[in-house]
Amino acid sequence: MSYVLGIDGGGSKTVCILMNDTGKVLGRAEAGASNYQSIGTQAALKSIESAIYAAAVEALKFTNNIKIEAICLGLAGVGRPEDIEVVKGIVQNLQNSSLLPITWQLPASNIVICNDALIALVGGVGYPVGIVVAAGTGSIVFGRNQNGDTKRVGGWGYILGDEGSAYKIAVAGMQAALKAYDGREMSTSLVEEFKQHLGLATIEGLIEIIYRRGWGVKEIAALAPIVDNAAACGDKVAHIIIDDAVKELIKATATVIEAIFSNSERFQVVTTGSVWQGKSRIREKFSTSIFTLFPSAKVIFPRHEPAYGAGLFALHILANFSQ
């Protein structure tokens, strides 16, 4: 029997799935971060190796000979040719590792290195055709059609892009609160909501928190639920911010659809990320608009995690596997 590995590597953790050629998961494990651009190549290699080792140990309960014939690594921030070369080096080191209790039979054609958006699509839909709309700390829309044509919109980071993301919602909320405090814009409950949540005597305290404490993107993005809750409670300013986020996500998704799908072609759109879990009906608004614009599209929740998607894509490459 043949086996494949699916790797989901990000800035906070690495997940490995080990499957046999029927699609059965024999091992799953997690390790530390594997974004080599932020932690370095050796640290990324160590995390991936650790995740594979733990998954393999689990799989050895069911078999005594793990022969890996395909691997898919979906890694955050990977897309440029130079990134691919770096990860190829990591895969080569994995094959030379004396730690891993597996046998490698891995031709170059069976090594897939891709952005994490692709494995989120495959995991979410269950096969490598459709669209993923990821809206969490950042945002990106990625699609792939039956012919293998792909289209990406967004994913340019918190300075250059990430429209519709939790980060952009949080920043817009704080900006609106400060404008209301100045008297430049209409009043909003966001002033009091931010003060209460952050324990501020006055909204001016945002200066100390955002600038002097050196808050990063993740910390700021974590404030997005404040805006979402205010919108759900009827705050007009918060409602406008949420609506603007929905419009951006709809525009990005429509751009991908029009680029790679025909009018009559049926496909699924999977939504992933924290933004969709809000109380302000953001996902309902998005879903209704997409169906109105593209009746052949169906908006769904993810069926599987991205690491499982990486495993499925490895199987797809190995034997044109389909679910």
Image (spheres, rainbow, N blue to C red):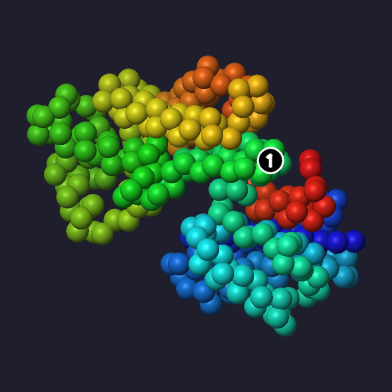
- Residue at the spot x=47%, y=41% of the render? 153
Decide: is 269 above or below 74.
Answer: above
Can you give x and y, in whole percent of width and height, for residue 234 in the image? 32, 20
Can you give x and y, in whole percent of width and height, for residue 120 in the image? 60, 46
Split into 4 quadrants, where in the image is the N terminus?
bottom right
Decide: is 163 above or below 211.
Answer: above
- Residue at the spot x=16%, y=37% of the render? 178
- Residue at the spot x=29%, y=56% of the render? 215
Does residue 54 appear in this view? no
Of residues 153 and 67, which is closer to you in this image? 153
Of residues 96 and 34, which is closer to you in this image? 96
Can you give x and y, in whole percent of width and height, for residue 87 in the image? 58, 68
Q: Amino acid at mark 1?
A: Asn
Can you give x and y, in whole percent of width and height, for residue 313 in the image? 71, 51
Query: How many numbered marks have been drawn onto this rendered protein structure?
Result: 1
Does residue 311 appear in this view? yes
Split into 4 quadrants, where in the image is the C terminus?
top right
Q: Quadrant of residue 291?
A: top right
**On the rendered structure, is 52 left or right of 315?**
left
Of residues 101 and 208, which is closer to you in this image? 101
User: Which residue corresponds to mark 1?
Assistant: 147
Neighbor class of circle 1 (other Cα within 10 Å; few <14, some 14-19, many 20+) is: few
